[in-house]
Every structure is written in C-alpha cells, then in structure tokens.
Amino acid sequence: MIKNLFFIAIVGGIITCACSKISSRKQDEARIERRVDSVLKLMTLEEKIGQLTLFTSDYDVTGPTLRENYKEDIKAGKVGAIFNAYGVDYVRQLQRMAVEETRLGIPLIFGYDVIHGHRTIFPISLGESASWDTAMVRKAAQIAAIEATAEGLNWTFAPMVDIARDPRWGRISEGAGEDVFLGKCMAEARVKGFQGRRLDDPKTLVACAKHFAAYGAAQAGRDYHTVDISERTLREVYLPPFKAAVDAGVGTFMTSFNETAGVPSTGNRFLLTDVLRNEWGFKGFVVTDYTSINEMVAHGFAKNEKEAGELAINAGVDMDMQGAVYYNYLKKSIEEGKVSMATVDEAVRRILRIKFKLGLFDNPYLYCDNNREKYEVMTQEHLDFARNMARKSIVLLKNEKQILPLSKEIKTLAVIGPLADNRRELLGSWSAAGNWTQAITILEGIRNAVSSSTKILYARGCNIHDDTTLYIAEAVNKSRQADAVILVIGEAHWMSGEAASRSDLGLPGVQQQLADAIMAVGKPVIAVLLSGRPLTITKLSEQTTALLAAWFPGTMAGPAVADVIFGDYNPSAKLPVTFPRNVGQIPIYYCMKNTGRPMDPDNKYTSKYLDIPNTPLFPFGFGLSYTSFEYSDLQLSQTILKASDTLQVRVKVKNTGKYSGEETVQMYVRDLVGSVTRPVKELKGFKKVYLNPGEEQVVAFKLTARDLSFWDIHMNFTHEPGEFKVFVGGDSEHCLEMGFVLE
Ligand code: GLC
C-alpha cells in the first residue's frame, strides 16, 4: 500500500527538474500536469469525491449549517478542503490528519473569507475602492495574504467582484461599487495582491473571484433574490470584473446563490463552462457558495439533492462547499451514468493542480510556521498602512465655509453619536480574524490628535438602532458648550454584508432626531457617516456644515478620521457608488441610458418623478478636497479617428487652493448612436495626480477602438463608427467635454 504519496510526487518532481535546465512557467505547468496525473491514477472513486468536498470547521461560522464530524471525514479521506479554520497549530493538526492518517496523504487546502484584511483590518472593500488607488488596494491584499498565511491559510474567498447598483443590497459593502471599469481595476489589483508572483510563495494566497455571476443585480436589492437581466447586460456590466480576475490569473471562482434568467449559477453551464472555460480559458477550479448546490432544490431547478449534484458537476462545478451533495450522492450518479468519470477526473485535476501550485504536495506544512504567526501579524508596518488606507478611503462630501480642517488648538470640541466611542462597528462586515477590541475609536483618535489644552466633551446621544431618546438632552447640552461638534453616526456592522438588505436607507433608530437636536444648537457640525452602503441622508447633508463618508474604516479608524478632520491628511477619495436622494430613485447610477424622453423641466411628458429630481444626492466619482482643482484646455490628438488609431486625450489640472492634495482625474466616454442604445457616460480611465498649491499638470489618457467596443445588436463585441464624446473631470457630473468621430 502506498503510504506516503507525496514521496512519489517529490521523486517525480526531482527527476523532471534534473532533466530541465531552466524551469520556465510552461515547464512548471507540464511538470505539475505530470504530477497531477501520477496522483490521479492512484486514487479510488471515494478519494476523488473527497477532493471535491469542502467543509467548514467549527472555528468560525459563515453560513446556515455546520457539520459535526468533519475531522473523521478528513481522516477517512472524504474531504479535500477546510474553511473557517486558522491558527498554525490548529491547521497543522488538521493537515496531519489528512497527510498522515489517510491512504494517499493528499494535503488539504485551507480557505477563509479574508476580504479586507486578516487580523489588521482595512476599510471595507467599498471603502478601499473609494480610494481609486489600485496600488494601495493591491498592497492591502498583499498584507492580508501575509497575515492570513502566517496563520496557516492558503486560500481566500476574495475578491468579491460583484457590480452593485442597489444600495438596499447589503453586499454592496463587499465590492468595488457600481462601475465596470473601476470594478475591473479593483478585481485585478486584489487578485494580484493576494496571489503575488507565485502561489508556492508561503506568503501568498490563492484568490477566489466571487460570486459568479450577477449576484448584485438581485431584484429589489433583496439578498439571494432573483436576477433577470439580458445577456447583453450580463456581458456589459456583470461579467467584465470576473474576466479581469481571470486575466489577472485568479486560481479559483465561486458560484453565486442567485439564478440568472431562470438558471441558478451553481447549475449554469453557460456561465461555468461556455463562458468561463471555453471563452475565457479559465484553468482553475470552481467552488460553490455555501450549500448552493442543495439550494437548487429550493430554487425549483432540481427535484432532489442528488439531481442538484448532477446538474452542478455537469455544469462545471468542481467543489461542493458544505453541501455534502457530492459526498452523499456522486458515487451513485456515476454508477447510474448520470455523471461521467471523465467529468469527475477533470474536477479532481483542477483541484490537485492548485494544491501543487500552492506547494502543498512538496510541503503540506509550508503554511504552518509558528514564528511567522508570532512576528508577522498586526505589525506596526501593517497598522501604519491600515491608517493610510483608511485615510485614503474617506470621502469629503461637504465642507461649508471651509470649516474643515479643524484646528488642533480648538478650545472645546463636542464628540457626539452612537459610533463615536464604539469599537465593535469599526471593522464592518466580513472582518475575518479581525479583533475589534484592538480597533481605535474615533473618539480616541480625536483625543490623541488635539492639543493638550483642548477640552473634549463626549456624549453618545442615542443608540445605533433603538428608539431611546433619553440621552439626546445630554448631547445637546455638551454641544452648547463646544466651539464645534463632531457627530459620528451611521449603521451597525451587521446592517450590511450578507443577508443584510434594508428597505429603508435612512439613519437607523433615532439618529436623525439626534442630528436635528444637535443642529438646532447652532454650532458648526462635522458629520462623520459610518456605513456599509450609501444612505439616504438628504436632510443630514443639508443641515450639517461638513460631511465625511468614512464607510467602516477598520482597525485604525480613529487615527484615520482624526487625520482627515485636523488636516494631517487632505481627503482625496471619490465615491465608487451613487448616493440616492431616497429609496424611490433606486436603481440609480451615473451610466444610465438617455431614454426616448430625457428629462426636460419644461416638458411634462419626459422621464422624471413628480416629487424628486432625477439627479442623485451625490454622484459617482464625487469627492471634495481641502483645496480646489481647476480643469482646463481639454485637447484631443484628432477629431477623426480611424479604428487603428489611438486617440490622445489631454487636460490641464491646476491646484487653485491653499493645500497640497491629490485629485483623481476621471475620463468618461459617450457613444452617441449605436446599433443598441448606449449609456450617457462610461468611465474609461482615471489617473491620480498630487499637486501643490498653484501647481498645474497635464494629465493624458489614451483611447482605442477596443475601449469603445460593446456588445452590438448581434451580440458581437465590437466598435461601431459614429460620433463620440469625451468627458474629463473630477466626478461623473462636472466635466469638460469634446467630440470626435470614429470612422
Ligand atoms: C457565504 C458567502 C460567501 C463566503 C462563503 C464562505 O455564504 O456568500 O461570500 O465566501 O459563504 O464563508
């Protein structure tokens, strides 16, 4: 009986290596293929089905079911992967069961939802995306990978790349917002950050593009709800960030819970095989979301779990997360001829390939280093980075009379609100192994920032989400004594993320009542909004003097918010998602269609509401600075463009204020006429420039026919001749524009 399988794999590998002088990536891949085949040949059907099975440990809970005897399953070779288990000793204990107590000793892969940090928690992904800083976002993923691998993990269920245009949907917090171009950039940055250059680098994680696909288009923003969109919308809006993840080399994909046009993603062969494998050439493996195979019975797409398993594996699902469907029924399905052995073998190959790439066959304990766990987690370097990432995520939405930045010498400052001295909420949802007790509150951040002579008066004012108004009077009283008020309000961490849709996006509880009472005092008020999504804060935005959208800023929330308030950092973030005036406007996003009756205030019979403007409260791409930037002299290299040409777009940007600052220059395009209607604007480029007061720079972009391509009336991805407009500015509404013609 072969006891120690990877002895074979290692010997095989050494011989191959000796023969090949320089092991190129191609030779690496060929070598891995040979090693995969050598293992596959030895496996029984039960062992193959084991590799297709993923169970959660009981270390953390991220879904509706748990499994008691997962350790016995590991020892029986019936599990190929474990999630929600971390910590070197624990991972080593489970890995030892697989490697030393099973017939073939195939190592486990360990997954976890490392979304926006592992122990050091960064802003929620929507907040990170508000930085529009792909280098920073990539670095955040890289640090998350260092900390997660230091605790035994080698697979993250991230990045979440779902485009989301409905803030009622709680999972808008986990992605990059409403825009396709920004979503693609963030998907690439996160995959490269997590995966690094080589997966067998013990400080990198294999990433997982999720949730495939169109999960963010759930009807009415209700999580897990039906998605019914055209193939054109699927391909124009929801698929591109996933394709960007494939192009970035992502190793795994996760299917989404939802159906699309009647077919649940977990049984959708068009998505999982026709598009993902045949069109895009994806070579990794596909895992389901939590029991999403089983849920195809509830969908009414399978009459029982066994049939659901057959639909899933024949559609292209390789690994069953927590459903135990392959575990329970796949052998019988094969015996009945409902599933071929070739299909099973291909699924096993894809999983073994990733395990070889991770280096787990050469050393199953590669990610079990107690020293790393001791010295590479929550280091000062990581915390400093987290503070900088958080500062760059905070969007300045209003700054009347330039009240901000405040002076650190301010005499008396009232800090009010249920989130001012709150630690737990700061990490937001999906905060992995983040320890909220280590987060720095906004009150602490402010106390540490002001001068020793400044008097800080704190009052909670109310709770986050109940109707107690008993504490408002104290808050009003303290505000009366102050020269300015910082009002920290918003959502609890659990009000966004999974299974956290909201039908009303106003401030929860009596927070608006608190705000009204504080505003009535008449002192300048700086409102700091903590949330996992845009909120309908129209009244607050009108009544407050200044307004910061800080999302959930993570472990270093306090210092980061204080850095912005007192001017140690000049805010540079821009909204990755539109803020609606009220829920009735939803879905509302910048790249909408013009319609046949575009809004005309002088004409009743045009597309509008009787009770509210069509415009949002704050548009996509919007964000103020303590300085001001002036755009001028937009120039195009030509106004007639041949399909083979590259259009050069240049604009001058000048810092016309008194602070140095960073501006995110955005370039949008409109295709005026197409074989199908086209959006009024589409983001096609952005660049960040740092300018000192008075400094001016020319910012240049390029546009090609491919950038102007779309899915035409025949569903071909192509460009079409005609008139276009280019828009360049600091947000999606305020732009310089010029026209050109594509021949
Ligand atoms: C959850 C989420 C998914 C997560 C998985 C494992 O249901 O939908 O994003 O990665 O289960 O925790």
Image (cartoon, grey):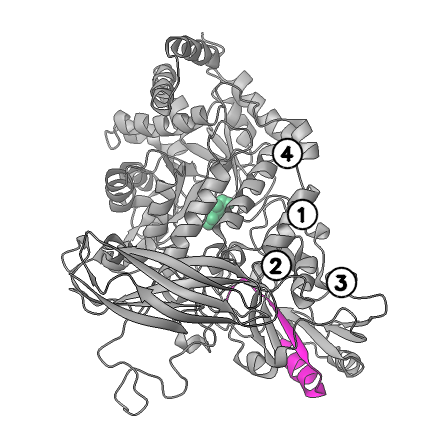
Kindly identify the residue that appears in the image at 44 percent across and 57 percent down. 687
Residue type highlighted by circle 2: Arg
Label 4 or label 3, whichever lies nearer to me, is 3
**Is 549 rendered above or below residue 342?**
below
Residue stretch rendered in magenta on the structure: 511-533
x and y percentages locating residue 184 in the rendered image: 38, 51
Mark 4, residues whose alpha carbon is within 10 Å: few (<14), some, or many (≥20)?
many
Image-quadrant location for residue 34: top left
Query: Residue under circle 4?
Result: 87
Q: CA distance from mark 1 to mark 4?
A: 20 Å
Q: Quadrant of the N terminus?
A: top left
Task: In this rendered view, identify the residue nearer to me: 304 or 738.
Answer: 738
Query: Residue under circle 2?
Result: 391
Task: In this rendered view, identify the residue nearer to me: 211 or 643.
Answer: 643
**Do the numbered discs 1 and 4 sit on residues whose CB atoms are within 8 Å?**
no
Q: Which one is earlier in the sequence, the residue at label 2 or at label 4?
A: 4
